[in-house]
Amino acid sequence: MDGGAESTILEVARGQGIARLTMNRPRARNALSRALMNALQKALDEIAADPTVKIVILGARGPAFCAGHDLREMRAHPGEAEIRATFAQCSRMMQSIVRLPQPVIARVQGPASAAGCQLVASADLAVAADGASFSTPGVNIGLFCSTPMVALARNVGRKQAMEMLLTGETVDAARARELGLVNRVVPADALDHEVDALAGLILSKSPVSLRIGKEAFYRQLEMPLAEAYEYASAVMTRNMMADDAAEGIDAFLEKRPPCWPGQ
């Protein structure tokens, strides 16, 4: 799979330290079918165990980023056990993105709604085209976006999250940046350049510190303040003992670029 791509519902390409995951159900607006979620989960699990991958870019083919769950599929299998399994599968996949050792950048070229918005919120960073949009419209069809709410509420303020959830209204890319849902907004024809530039900047950093830092960031968020500081101090001490920290500090003091061990 290295250096190539698999033309299925999920295209996977790896090279130069980057894994690119591209959802490829454009006619279904990249809705998260069970098959697509299986493919994403498999790719994430493989990437987590691959030390050659330093960063992940999650994108999509077609005009939409992701329309959320595949409602046609869910209505075709309406039993409680099937529905429960679908939401459990999606929740596991979203948590896998957060727990992935490598940073994940969402490349958002179009509308991201419901679980699609949840995907963006679950990613570590997000770059959006200026025509992209974001929504949690479940309330409009009698199905409150309760699972997307988990990721959304961890990205934007409570009042803003509740407004999106209660009204189902669409937020444009500029407003999403104001809310903290995305990091950068650029014209559509500059989207790939901006995503690659951000990925390249992160790739220049110590891979050891990135892995340690991402894990610590999400763990401390769930802790009380004193416990978070105690945990972060222990993490930083462990990081300080790593060869990358020694090289980085020496390079800073010697006014030269660092040469990360193992690269």
Image: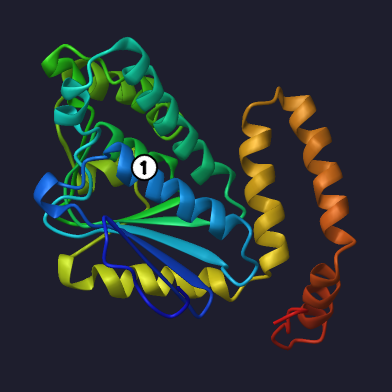
Q: Nearer the viewer, residue 16 or 214?
A: 16
Which amino acid, by three-letter code, is at mark 1? Met
Reading the image, the residue beneath label 1 is 37
- Picture quadrant of residue 258: bottom right
Residue sitting at 40 percent across and 74 percent down? 197
Residue sitting at 38 percent across and 17 percent down? 84
Residue 18 image offset from top left, x and y in percent: 48, 71
* Residue 90 in view: yes
- Picture quadrant of residue 217: top right
Residue 24 image offset from top left, x and y in percent: 23, 57
Q: Nearer the viewer, residue 190 or 71?
A: 71
> Which corner quadrant holds the C terminus?
bottom right
Whether 73 is drawn above or below 197: the answer is above
Whether 89 is drawn above or below 257: the answer is above
State the count of labels: 1
> Which corner quadrant holds the N terminus?
bottom left
Residue sitting at 43 percent across and 35 percent down? 155
Judge left or right: residue 120 versus residue 61.
Answer: right
Q: Coloring scheme of the render? A: rainbow
Residue 186 image offset from top left, x and y in percent: 23, 63
Q: Nearer the viewer, residue 65 or 182?
A: 65
Q: Nearer the viewer, residue 191 or 89?
A: 89
Could you tell me which secondary element the residue under label 1 belongs to?
helix
* Residue 181 in view: no
Judge left or right: residue 167 versus residue 8.
Answer: left
Residue sitting at 40 percent across and 33 percent down? 90
Residue 91 image offset from top left, x and y in percent: 44, 30
Judge left or right: residue 131 versus residue 1.
Answer: left
